[in-house]
Image: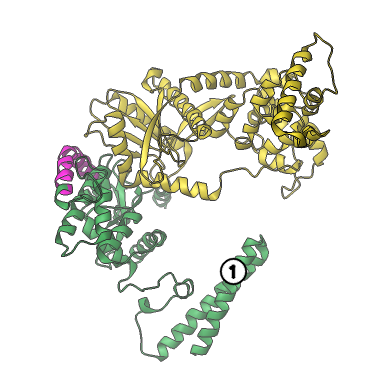
Chain colours: A yellow, B green
Amino acid sequence: MTATEARLARLRGRALARPHNARTIAALASNPGCARRAIMDAAGVDKPRIAAHAGLPAPFGQSRFALARGNAFEAQLKAEGAAELLTLLRDHLQLPIPEAHYHDLNEVGGNPSPDLRHKRTGQLLTQAVASDTATGTMFDHPLLRLEVGGRHAFLEPDLIAFQLHGRFHVIEIKSFAVIDGQADADKVAAAAIQSAVYVLALRDALAAQRLPPEAVHHETILVCPENFSNRPVATSLDVRKQLTGLRRQLARIARIDDLLDQLPDGLTFDLDPDGVGVPQRDPADLVTAIRRVDARYAPECLSTCEMCFFCRDEAAGTTAALGREAREELGGVEQVQTALRLAGGTDRPAEGSDLAEAARLLRQAARLRADALGRESRRPGALGEAV
Amino acid sequence: MTDSVQSLERRIARLRTAVREAVLAGNRDRASALRRDLREAEQAWDAALAAAEVQAEPRPAADRPRPEAQETGTETRSPLLPLRDQVYQALSLLTVPAAPRLIATVHEAFFATTFPTTRLTSLKRDEERSFRAAPFARPYYLCAALTADLLAPARGLLAISTWPMEVRVIGSLSPRVDFLTGAIRVAEAIERLPAPVPAARRLLWRFAASIPAAADSAASTNPHQVKQAALAELAVHEQADRETRRAAARRARTQLDDVQQLFGSRMHDAAQQGQRGRGSDQK
């Protein structure tokens, strides 16, 4: 065990390490500046339990209904040897008729063991590339592996398609609708980054077989229901930008030492479980320990991180809690109260200081707001109440 | 006698509610105690009914009403055939291994009754148990399709034991070949129907939508055209698929015992068998 691993194990305490998955890797890349998340994920701590013990559990995880809907849509596409998906791929990739092979990698010989599935995935993918005739077109739930911070995380794309003498395509099935060619931008962004994680893992797997990274197409295929029907529609997503970001993040996780060096030696997130696993640690003590690691809260965290309510509570009253856009607009102003005082004119920073320009803009904004809303909002303190 | 059966049924219903409430309340101890009571009550119910059966004229066991069917009311219109016969009907129409959902849809389209697909999971297990207890005692068994590479049960597919092994092994092209074969059989079955049935036409459209040049829209789906389109694509895959299936079937017949030929050999079974084999060698 290296010094770093020992350090991370101490942070984790007695709990079992939770491995990374596509969602956690994607979340890391979407908020790269958050040291708290980086440290907690690297140590593999049980974030939902820690957040709950600290008194601010996140109602996290997908809703049961969304999960059921997603599973039903995927099952529909993959029924009868993925017949519907094949039609879609023939259309989208101009897949020739003879290439209609389907491999089910959900289990190997009735055994769902991840190691076995990962090995079999490797075998079948290489076989497909090496063969002169088509031996594999669609690989249902292959199991890939990606090294994250020195540990292997298993990743399971919905489907990988391979075109003979061509390239691999990662296919992601999502149950949010594409209505009139438009879909929820946040959801598409999340799907893109998740697909990018799979592309990276697939490239790693192929690199082990001495195949170039170009063997995996940088355009992944997102399959969603079209309009208000259950009919699937395929869209290409270019994930080159996400890949660059991910690679940088993964390299950064590898340098987790830099972050660890800034933390006190005895710091731990151990919950001090008793004989039956009930946490005994004083919550206030745990909160102090968590606060030792800096977080960078943004409202987007609410959909990706289990610590979100804790960090939001901590960030209350800061401009960061209003979102990245608001924070950037407000420049150097950290606290909402400061911004309000500057706008109301109670704080007047010295001319020429960093805040002078921000204060001028805020006063201007306050005046515009008052004019727009009429007399009522002009009474003293109205601005403060509105926020 | 019937009084006691009725009071037992009431007790079973009460206990079920109590178990559910205990489970929802997270009270595990109470739930397991209640479950124990429930099992006892159910055993008493079986015993009471058996006693009643002896007193009255003997009836075949299959006709005995099961308490859960009565209570939940899932079987509003009780079908004339047992579940395994319904599955057999649907599979015989398709002539290829199929997933529970497709089996239920086919049965609904051509035989007018459907069943919850969840019931098929336990059905395969029951068939295997029955075969192990008395091999080949029934004219047919509902069994697994086997994967061509490892001869393991293919996930979520049901087949009939009387089919040749070549039909029951699944290579990488077989899902597509079976899909096209199924489409052809459904199209033929619709052509035999005297009047068009909406459920059957919906099923045909589901097939047609995933076959090139089979149909333009749901309304204009024509069984003859679907069949021709499916045959055309089938001609492309047939040869390659047949070779894989023949080779796999040969292996299955030589390597597997009777039970495994029907229900597949699982990877962990193989490991256990190796140990058992070594054990018997030592004796």
- Residue at the outermost front position: A375
In the image, taking residue A148 as reference, residue A259 lies left or right, namely: right
From what the image shows, is residue A349 above or below residue B222? Answer: above
The reply to whether the magenta stretch includes residue B247 is: yes
From what the image shows, is residue A215 above or below residue A304? Answer: above
Q: Quadrant of residue A18?
A: top right
**Res. A294 visible in picture:** no
Q: Nearer the viewer, residue A294 or A10?
A: A294
Looking at the picture, how far across and down is residue A145, in whole percent? 48, 29
In the image, taking residue A121 as reference, residue B170 lies left or right, namely: left
Q: Pointer 1 indicates a residue of which chain? A: B
From what the image shows, is residue B207 above or below residue A185? Answer: below
Q: Nearer the viewer, residue A386 or B67?
A: A386
Q: Main secondary structure of the magenta part?
A: helix
- Residue at the outermost top position: A352
Q: How many marks?
A: 1
Q: Nearer the viewer, residue A272 or B253?
A: A272
Q: Quadrant of residue A349?
A: top right
Q: Which residue is mark 1?
A: B35
Q: Secondary structure at mark 1?
A: helix
Q: Three-letter amino acid code at disc 1?
A: Arg
- At 41% from the left edge and 86% from the top edge, which residue is drawn? B53
In the image, taking residue A273 as reference, residue B262 lies left or right, namely: left
Looking at the picture, how far across and down is residue B264, in whole percent? 33, 51
Instruction: Give, as a single range, the part of the protein colored magenta.
Output: B226-249
- At 35% from the left edge and 84% from the top edge, which residue is drawn? B59
Looking at the picture, how far across and down is residue A89, in whole percent? 31, 34
